[in-house]
Image: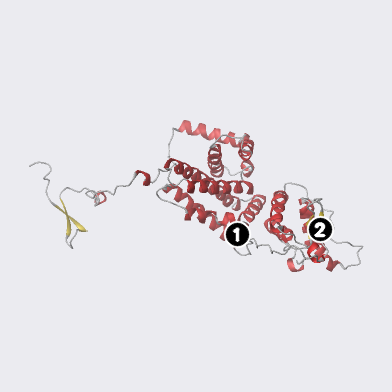
Amino acid sequence: RHSRFGGTYVIKNVKGVSDKEMVVHKPVKDVQTLDFDRAKRGVKKAKNKIAPDDMVHARRSTLAVRMFLKEFCMEFLLCAYNNLMHNVKDALVRQRAQLNDESYYLWAIKFFMEFNRGYQFKVDLISETMSKQTFHFLQQQIENYRDNFEMEKKNRPKYLMWSKRMHLAIRAYEELLMNLVQMESSKDEKIRECGRVIRAGVFYEPEYRELCLQQLSTFNPDRMSLGYLKDLIHTTHVFLKLMEHMSKNKHLLVSKKTKKKPKSGKSGGGGSKNKSSVVPPGANESKEEQWDAVSPHISALLQGRGTIPTDVIPFDAASEVPIEDQKEEAMRRIQKAMLKKDAAEAVALLRASRDVWPEGDSFGPADSMAEEDFMALREILFADLGVSINENTGEVEEGGDEGQV
């Protein structure tokens, strides 16, 4: 007979449409080769609703090529990575680069930081991109890409382009988080301390905490690839694990977004209290800017980069006020130092004040770590202590009324 009439076979332990065993009309060599969807008609999709392909394609080169590329990456990290990434980022920030140059910057962050993490993890080779400033840059880029992606709803080539760029930024963000995990597991105490300072700054801000949630809520399977979703879920998982590890056995300080209160219609009054107000309108916004200006210097000092004076005395021994009652004045001095952008004096005053007034943990616990000092200084700067900057002269002034600590 013709080969198409090969006979009828029964597959044991596999039920068909009825309760009887399945009947097939072709010889089956392996159960795994059974395809129940072979005769089904596939669902057609419009061209503008087909999911884009993944941007990651694995290519395995010969051993000689792989060894050469490995040597090149090692030499590049050792000699050129930090300088090149600094210059490229400077050009991107100053808008002196060409269009789409940030895509190559994001790819380089992902690739070389992953190579460094997998080969011999050395933080000094990637110190230029392993910082809070890089987290801030990536967060800004992701938000920019998301806004452009949502604007180009009908232009498929455009929104696919923004989707790919968003994927690059997410992969770079994921690699930064993976490096934070690696820093936490390092045997060097200084590396672990640097990682804790960066994590404290990242987890404190609500923009970083809500980034993954916003990206998940805007995912569109018709316009974003499956690889993008996998990388985003993995990034969210690593972020949550880091936050869980950091908040374990201690209190995790976070900030919340506050809505601006509408200004009252009464602008006059002529009262002396209104003129000598300790906190002027927009003080929270101005203090956010002041903190952004001084926090990088504080972070560098707490990581051991810089000199902290040791001859600072937080109290006035000649004053008639008892030393125990000069705690608030010490806080004012710390706040003044930060307003003057003197990070070294602020850190020195904080540590000296902690030795003088250890009770109550007003200046942090006695065995506090770098990230706890970082957050303690931030709380002191934002506290209402009656210290402000004169908008006309730019000098630090102290109000007449006592602030609340």
Residue 386, by quadrant, is bottom right
Q: Which residue is mark 1?
A: 246
Local secondary structure at mark 2: helix
Residue 385, by quadrant, is bottom right
Q: Residue at x 15, y 49 (%)?
A: 25
Is 71 rendered above or below residue 224?
above
Q: Seen in the image, is 84 located left or right of residue 238?
A: right
Would residue 17 be visible to someone looking at this image?
A: yes
Badge 1 local density, few (<14 within 10 Å), some, or many (20+)?
some
- Quadrant housing the N terminus: top left
Q: How is the image coloured?
A: secondary structure
Badge 2 local density, few (<14 within 10 Å), some, or many (20+)?
many
Mark 2: which amino acid? Arg
Q: Position of residue 274 (x, y in %)?
A: 78, 64
Q: Residue at x 60, y 59 (%)?
A: 246
Q: Seen in the image, is 369 located left or right of residue 49?
A: right
Is 223 rendered above or below residue 61?
below
Q: Residue at x 12, y 43 (%)?
A: 4
Disc 2 or disc 1, which is closer to the eye? 2
Mark 1: which amino acid? Met
Q: Name the foreground residue: 271 vs 19.
A: 271
Q: Which residue is mark 2?
A: 333
Local secondary structure at mark 1: helix
Q: Residue at x 19, y 59 (%)?
A: 17
Q: Name the foreground residue: 264 vs 281.
A: 264
Would residue 131 be visible to someone looking at this image?
A: no
